Image: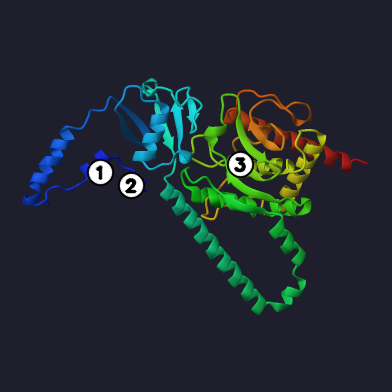
Amino acid sequence: MAEHEDLKPAAELLADIDLDGVHSDVHSHASLSDSEDENEPEAVLKLTVQLHNKPIELPFYHADATLQDLSDTVAEDLHIPPSNQKFLITPQTGLLKPPFKHPTLPLHTLLDKKIVLMGATSTEVQDLESDLHARRTRLSRRAAALAAARSTHNKPARATRDWKRVQDDARYTFHTITPLPYLPNPSKSLRYLERLAQDAGIKASMRKHGFSVGLLTEMDPAEHTTHESRTLGLNRNRGEVIELRLRTDAYDGYRDYRVIRKTLCHELAHNVWGEHDRKFWDLCGEIEGEVERGDWRRGGKSVGGQEFYNGVGEGEGEGVDGGGWEGGEYVLGGAAGAGGMSGVGAPLSRREIMARAAEERMRKQDEAKRARDAAAAP
């Protein structure tokens, strides 16, 4: 099947054609086409889906059309392969993607629901991969040019260069960094992930503990959000893949950078310990301390000059995690219990989260003041 970048339905494409310039010698052909259109069967069922915030009407010519027929029509008409398709159906139904658990679900039962299609065409995915490859090539050339310049103009510095650290940085790192191409603005997510990977504290901690992660990527919030909890991070197979929730639930912004970085510390601890026992929490706290000490800037601006965070962010200080080598999950929601474990409860509102964060800061300030007063006492 040929791939096309234009996702307009056939009816919209025909509407865009200017017929004023057609010569009279092809008038008979136009009349024949009109006659053929009149003979086209009328759709029995029409279903509207939202793609990139635009409604698209899909026709079906049999009354018993199913969810699988919807997927086939999207693949044929919109050129989005099943592997890239995700349907967010509200209210209540949730997120569905091929292969479906119930492929024979009748489409007429979805007529009163909102259906949001999330997916990228094969062409869009290829274009993104090409852009990422070109960007890596440019960065590699820039790094090579910078290294050559330093070699020529600053030779005394070579004698003091820490080559072991250079080798460790290349070994203990995130070997592949990839955003989700079907979500809005993947290039910004890529810059966010690269900023995490280049964070001075993260790099120092990974060198110290010998952490190596195969793939660092972002998490689709729609796939990891329930009424009871929101998953903030996943570690699959002891660092083979780490997923981080970068975006807000509505995809309209990015979460607090320091919260995401703390989630990353949590997931890195799962490279060593699977269960949330005392050994895990000791290592997690050690990593968090190393990262904080390495953050000499105590702030952070994006490459474009925009703030990624403002000090207190959504979900700060309210994390729990499923643990385990296979998909350890860092979940927002639920009250913390002994040993850092918690049950799952309703997600806290932003107001409640900020209030708890403020209370925690005040508590730490009081403890620090009492410690200083005790040290100054005779």
Q: Amino acid at mark 2?
A: Asp
Mark carried by residue 13: 1
The percent coordinates of residue 302 (x first, y second) are 55, 52
Residue drawn at x 75%, y 36% is: 274
Name the side, left or right, on which 304 lies relative to 80: right
Of residues 122 and 375, the one nearer the viewer is 122
User: Which comes sooner in the sequence, label 3 or label 1?
Assistant: 1
The percent coordinates of residue 24 (x first, y second) are 6, 50
Of residues 287 and 170, the one nearer the viewer is 170
Residue underneath mark 2: 6
User: Which comes sooner in the sequence, label 2 or label 3?
Assistant: 2
Name above or below for residue 21 compared with residue 78: below
Q: Amino acid at mark 1?
A: Leu
Q: Is residue 295 visible?
A: no
The answer to which image quadrant residue 271 occupies is: top right
Name above or below for residue 97 compared with residue 376: above
Q: Amino acid at mark 3?
A: Leu
Label 2 and label 3: CA atoms lie apart by 32 Å
Name the side, left or right, on which 266 lies relative to 93: right
User: Which comes sooner in the sequence, label 2 or label 1?
Assistant: 2
User: Are circles 2 and 1 on residues that touch, CB within 8 Å?
Assistant: yes
